[in-house]
Structure formats: structure tokens, C-alpha cells
Image (spheres, helix red, strand yellow):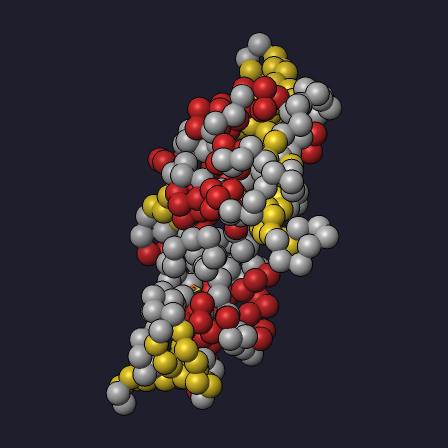
């Protein structure tokens, strides 16, 4: 543990934590635009800047990337911090005047006019890199990346052609703070070819990456639910039967815990890829714990059933 001070408050923090993590866990709010818990810190937007004093030296640093150390004295809203954030927001407003997340933060800091430096007209991408990092680090598809430099820097698919590695999961759109990435599903897509109109059927389109993916229809409901390309990838990497992917998540049977067999060892918790399992006190007892699967978080992958040595987690058969 290390001892530090944030805004005059004495705090003990775990070594290796970032300033942003420590501030948030102590209810000290620092604005961010390019940070997400599931991703490695990146330090692109710079709105999370704070002032750090160590041994009479002071500097402005991005709190999302800076690790805590013994004796640090941090100010999250000093005049120098506010000035730096305002400058960053002026730049962001100059680039992206119509992005709500930028507008809101700018208004909060009293920034009314965009800076006249480096103006790029009416962009919607703030170059935070969240989409690129999520695609690489979480989805592990690596379908998009940064290209170009300076004013011409942008995010896109390789060579501006269709992103062939994009699985159409939509994670990029989910993490984008500006809403510029659009994922659209069409029930009856068509295309114009020289011979006339081509019927494509259910299709997902991500225009930003020039990606069109055929959607698979759920065997239970008949409704399109996920790109076939994505499901084929999952079939190869997940320990599940091919039939599992025939059914949309809302119609799947999910694992259930038999409280009499479960001993609360927690092996399933450690292995659950989406953190959907917690321990809870067994019904009718005070201190005996059992695994509890949160249906709202469970992805239905059944990894827990593999790691339960007592076969206490079972999945009802898919109808
Ligand atoms: S949140 Fe720290 S630089 Fe963007």
C-alpha cells in the first residue's frame, strides 16, 4: 500500500493502481473521455489531467495512466488543472462541435467557443481510440486501426476497404462516446447488381467499416439475431455444441446451480468469462455460501459447467 493525498484527503491505495482508479474509489470525480474499465489506459483525450506534487516538484499528468506512489500530493481541480482541461476542451470542441459528450463537458468547464487552432470541421470522431482498443483487446478481432497523422488521423478499416476481420459484434459502437459508429440490422436487405435487384435477406451493416454481414435466424423464433460470421468464429473457439448457436440468447436455456450439490468452492466464479457468478448465502442458512448465476449477465457459454468438479451446475436441454 502507498500513502497519498488527494485534494487534501489522506488516502491509502494499492500499489500499481492508477490515480483515476484511486480517485474514483474515494468518490472523487475526474472527467474522462477515453477510459474504460475493461481496457488498458491509453491517455488520448487528456481531460483527466490532474496536478501532482512530489518533493516540491509539480507537474500535470493524465490520471488514467499515472500510477500512485508514496507521498504524492494530488489536486484534481487546481487552477492549473482547470486551465489545462479548458484548453483540451477548446481543441476538442474545434474538432467535434456537434458531439454531445464534448459539448456537455465544455459547458461544465465554461468553454463556450472552440479554439481556433488545428480546426478540423465538424468531425464526430474524437480519436479516443476506444473502438480500436476494444476491437483488439476485448474482441481480439483487430479489425480496425488508426491511420494517417495530424489533422488527417482517423480510425478505419485496413486501406479503407471492408474490414474483413470485423465480426459484427457491435462492441465498437457500444464503447464509442460520440455515437458516430452505427450498427444497423435490416430484415430484408437487397443489393443492386447489373442483373437487377439481389435479395440478401437479414443483414447487419456497419457503414463506418464498410462491413455487411448476413444474419443468422434463430431456430426457435425465426428472427435474425447475430452475424453468421461471428457465430462461426465462436463455434471454433468456445467449448459448445454447434446447436447452441442455432438459438438466440433470449431463447437459450442457461446454467442452473443445484444448491444441494454446490459447496461454494468458487471455481466457477474464477472461470466465468463475463463475471456473471457471485457467491450468495444458501437459502435458509446464515453462513453457508453457494454459487449464484446472474441471468442478466450470463452469456450462456457454459464454461462454469466444465469447471464445476461436483457437477452442481447443469444446463436444461435446449428444446
Ligand atoms: S481519460 Fe485519461 S487521457 Fe482520456
* x, y percent for residue 299: 58, 38
Split into quadrants, the picture shows ligand 1 in the one at bottom left
Identify the residue at horizontal 50%, vertical 70% (top origin): 25
Q: Nearer the viewer, residue 176 or 190?
A: 176
State whether residue 156 is above or below residue 198.
Answer: below
Q: Nearer the viewer, residue 66 or 306?
A: 306
Identify the residue at horizontal 51%, vertical 75% (top origin): 26
Visible residue check, residue 191: no
Identify the residue at horizontal 33%, vertical 56% (top origin): 150
Q: Residue 257: which quarter of the image?
A: top right
Q: Quadrant of the N terminus?
A: bottom left
* x, y percent for residue 225: 64, 29
Visible residue check, residue 19: yes
Q: Nearer the viewer, residue 81 or 5?
A: 5
Q: Residue 213: which quarter of the image?
A: top right
* x, y percent for residue 46: 40, 67
Amino acid at each position: 500500500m502507498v500513502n497519498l493525498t488527494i485534494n487534501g484527503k489522506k488516502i491509502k491505495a494499492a500499489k500499481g493502481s492508477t490515480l483515476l482508479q484511486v480517485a474514483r474509489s474515494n468518490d472523487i470525480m475526474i472527467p474522462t473521455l477515453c477510459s474504460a474499465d475493461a481496457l488498458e489506459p491509453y491517455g488520448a483525450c487528456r481531460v483527466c489531467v490532474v496536478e501532482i506534487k512530489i518533493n516540491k516538484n509539480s507537474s500535470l499528468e493524465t490520471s488514467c495512466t499515472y500510477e500512485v506512489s508514496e507521498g504524492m500530493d494530488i489536486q484534481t481541480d487546481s487552477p492549473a488543472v482547470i486551465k489545462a482541461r479548458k484548453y483540451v476542451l477548446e481543441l476538442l470542441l474545434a474538432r467535434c462541435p456537434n458531439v454531445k459528450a464534448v459539448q456537455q463537458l465544455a459547458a461544465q468547464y465554461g468553454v463556450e467557443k472552440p479554439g481556433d487552432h488545428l480546426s478540423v470541421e465538424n468531425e464526430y470522431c474524437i480519436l479516443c481510440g476506444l473502438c480500436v482498443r476494444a476491437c483488439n483487446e476485448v474482441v481480439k478481432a483487430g479489425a480496425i486501426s488508426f491511420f494517417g497523422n495530424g489533422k488527417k488521423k482517423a480510425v478505419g478499416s485496413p486501406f479503407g476497404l471492408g474490414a474483413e476481420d470485423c465480426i459484427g459484434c457491435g462492441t465498437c459502437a457500444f464503447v464509442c462516446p460520440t455515437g458516430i459508429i452505427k450498427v444497423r440490422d435490416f430484415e430484408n436487405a437487397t443489393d443492386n447488381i447489373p442483373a437487377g435487384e439481389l435479395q440478401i435477406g437479414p443483414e447487419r451493416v456497419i457503414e463506418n467499416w464498410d462491413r455487411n454481414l448476413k444474419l443468422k435466424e434463430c431456430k426457435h423464433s425465426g428472427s435474425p439475431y447475430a452475424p453468421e460470421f461471428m457465430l462461426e468464429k465462436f463455434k471454433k473457439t468456445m467449448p459448445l455444441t454447434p446447436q447452441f448457436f442455432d438459438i438466440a440468447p433470449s431463447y437459450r436455456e442457461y446454467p442452473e446451480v443445484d444448491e444441494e450439490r454446490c459447496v461454494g468452492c468458487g471455481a466457477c466464479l474464477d472461470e466465468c468469462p463475463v463475471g456473471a457468478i457471485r457467491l450468495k448465502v444458501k437459502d435458509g442458512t446464515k453462513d453457508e455460501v453457494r454459487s449464484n448465476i446472474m441471468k442478466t449477465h450470463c452469456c450462456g457459454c457454459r464454461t462454469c459447467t466444465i469447471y464445476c468438479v461436483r457437477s452442481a451446475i447443469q444446463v436444461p436441454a435446449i428444446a
